[in-house]
Image: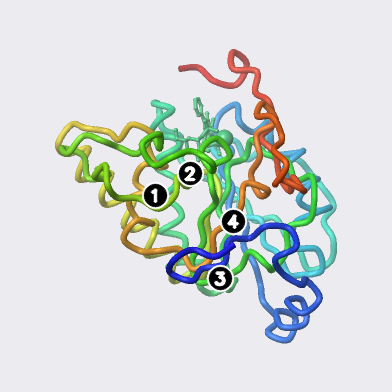
Amino acid sequence: MMTPWFAPILWDGSYNIDILNAQFHQRHVRIGLTVFAIKKYTVFMKTFIETAEKFFMVGYKVNYYVFTDRVKEMPNITLADGRQLVVLEVPSYKRWQEVSMRRMEMIRDNSSKRFINEVDYLVCVDVDIKFTDEVGVEILSDVFGTLHPGYFRAPREHFTYERRKASAAYIPPDEGDFYYAGGYFGGTVEEVYMLTSFCHSEMMTDKGNNIEAIWHDESYLNKYFLYHKPTKVLSPEYLWDDNIEVPEVLKRRRSVIVPKNYNAVRNR
Ligand code: 2GW
Ligand code: MN
């Protein structure tokens, strides 16, 4: 429940939400939830927002920041008091790898321009998820990552870090604490700015050298966390994959990956 650098690993039962709520309400914290719905991924929006209304930071001031190239396809959903949906129109990239990777640049740019004036913390997630149980202020910290559901019990040798030395995302075989998921990280706006700046510029370095890390943005995120340790680590309760058999330690599933009809939503 604790990393060797004394960051809590959040499992059900490791915290008292009433104490945390009292602390965070006292500070009137505002939370931004960033999500990207580019091209056909707009189909995930309705479920994403509806389930977030039910389970994500209920009772807090929440801004949904939706980056999309299809503004007209945004669902019209009535939100609870104190919550708003901010649609940010962005260009779409042709390659799907780039669609995923460019999120770092867009989060970075909006952190300094907009998010810093509007919220205290950012939570940055994939859109192909649905919330199925409470996610509250227990996750908030300077900078946090999430254990990838496929690797949280795996030995380091199995982590799918970038292993080519030519890439800026390279991680030596004898280094690396956890394998973090690309689709769920966050922290204060300042910390998320630093994280996304790092990931974007390392991606650009690689691009200049005609190399792209094996798992795209996820590989650069793992590199960042190796040398800038997260101050909280979310257990896979926060991002579960129902294709994996539920282990005994997993008492709650707070968000799960929505099964994709690959042909319908991806044109690789
Ligand atoms: C992605 C792959 C193939 C074709 C299209 C797309 C796509 C992604 C798209 O057309 N439109 C779009 O908005 N996206 C955004 O990128 C969307 O927010 C989506 O959740 C995110 C990542 O793509 P996804 O969810 O299809 O990829 P996963 O779940 O396999 O992602 C993991 O690995 C990625 C890198 O390959 C990222 O690190 C991601 O954060 C991981 O969860
Ligand atoms: Mn995804």
Say which residue appears at 81% left-offset and 76% top-offset: 18
Quadrant housing residue 44: top right
Q: Could you say where residue 230 lies in the image, as x and y percent from the top left? A: 45, 63
Which label number is shown at residue 234?
4
Say which residue appears at 47% left-offset and 47% top-offset: 180
Q: Could you say where residue 63 lies in the image, as x and y percent from the top left? A: 67, 62
First in sequence, mark 3 or 4: give its number. 3
Which label number is shown at residue 182?
2
For the C terminus, the quadrant is top left
Which label number is shown at residue 25?
none
First in sequence, mark 1 or 2: give its number. 2
Residue type marked 3: Ser
User: Are the two marked residues, 2 and 3, in contact with CB atoms closer than 8 angstroms?
Assistant: no
First in sequence, mark 2 or 3: give its number. 3
User: Are the two marked residues, 1 and 2, in contact with CB atoms closer than 8 angstroms?
Assistant: yes
Quadrant housing residue 43: top right
Which label number is shown at residue 221?
1
3D distance between C-alphas at marks 2 and 3: 18 Å
Figure quadrant, ligand 2: top right
First in sequence, mark 4 or 1: give its number. 1
**Beta carbon at label 2 within 8 Å of ligand 1:** yes
State the SS at label 4: strand
Residue type marked 2: Gly
User: Are the two marked residues, 3 and 4, in contact with CB atoms closer than 8 angstroms?
Assistant: no
